[in-house]
Image (cartoon, grey):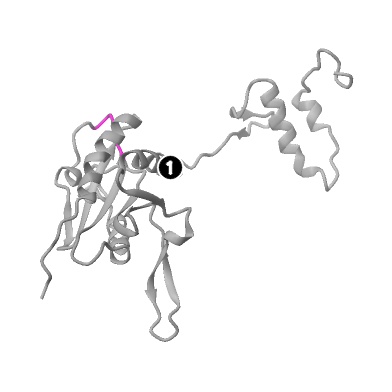
Amino acid sequence: MAVTGARPRVPTKAELDRIRYTPITAGFAPIAELSRQIANRRGLAADIDASGEAKGVLLDVAELWEMYVLSVLRKAASPLTVTHGTREKAATKKLLHSDVSGQGLGTLIPDAILLSGAAIKGVVDAKYKSLHPSASSPNGAQRDDLYQMAAYLGRFQAPVGTETWGLLAYPFDPSKPDTPNAEQNSPWSLDDRKKIGFATLPHNPADAVAKLRSLVMRMATPVALPATA
């Protein structure tokens, strides 16, 4: 208060623009502007300056959806544990390995891995897109997503003789309340030991946890399969 007085005034944008920064302090200019907006209780609101240019904040909604799916999955997964594939390096695997050098090629990073102790039970990947049919994806699920999950299940496998599950999690679309065909006919078999499921999750966490719990229980229940010849 000795410096600013009892009633300090927030500088205007024009006043901030007149500040002469040195090469060392130039990086603080955006912080000064952000501080001005916060002091005016504007926070990160979009702004249009005199030149007509709009300034705002870009959010990676696909990453937010991934974090949401991970959050509700951890609540629904008991008795399984959930490993965050994109944040924990130990949870990644390589798609290919060289017969000559042993070097790995093509890192596989699923969003979540479901474990029973040290044994893999399934893989979950969050997709911030529609599961309903479209012109580019007449069956709903996109081909690249199916290939990606097939690659995951080729490396993240349950113990021999039991099933490995893959789950693709999409946001529920209130404008299309009907259940997409891919979800309605889940699970789908990749082969006799690998299954892929599709789920559209509500935006209400409690509802999403309830829906996921029944799916996770199927992954957690061991199903012994006859050995193939």
Q: From this viewpoint, is residue 54 visible?
A: yes
Between 104 and 42, the one lying in front of the other is: 104
10 Å crowding of disc 1: few (<14), some (14-19), many (20+)? some
Which picture quadrant has residue 201? top left
Examine the rendered structure and indicate whether residue 99 appears above or below residue 69.
below
Q: Is residue 98 magenta?
A: no
Which secondary structure, mark 1? helix
Which picture quadrant has residue 17? top right
Chain part drawn in magenta: 171-176
Point out residue 133 in the picture as x, y percentages from the top left corner. Answer: 22, 44
Between 18 and 171, the one lying in front of the other is: 171
Say which residue appears at 31% left-offset and 64% top-offset. Answer: 151
Point out residue 99 in the picture as x, y percentages from the top left corner. Answer: 38, 84
Q: Main secondary structure of the magenta part?
A: loop
Horizontal arrangement in the rendering, residue 199 relative to residue 68 (left or right)? left
In the rendered structure, which amino acid carries the disc numbered 1? Met
Q: Which residue is mark 1?
A: 67
Examine the rendered structure and indicate whether residue 207 appears above or below residue 136.
above
Point out residue 29 in the picture as x, y percentages from the top left corner. Answer: 76, 38
Say which residue appears at 18% left-offset and 34% top-offset. Answer: 178
Quadrant placement of the N terminus: top right
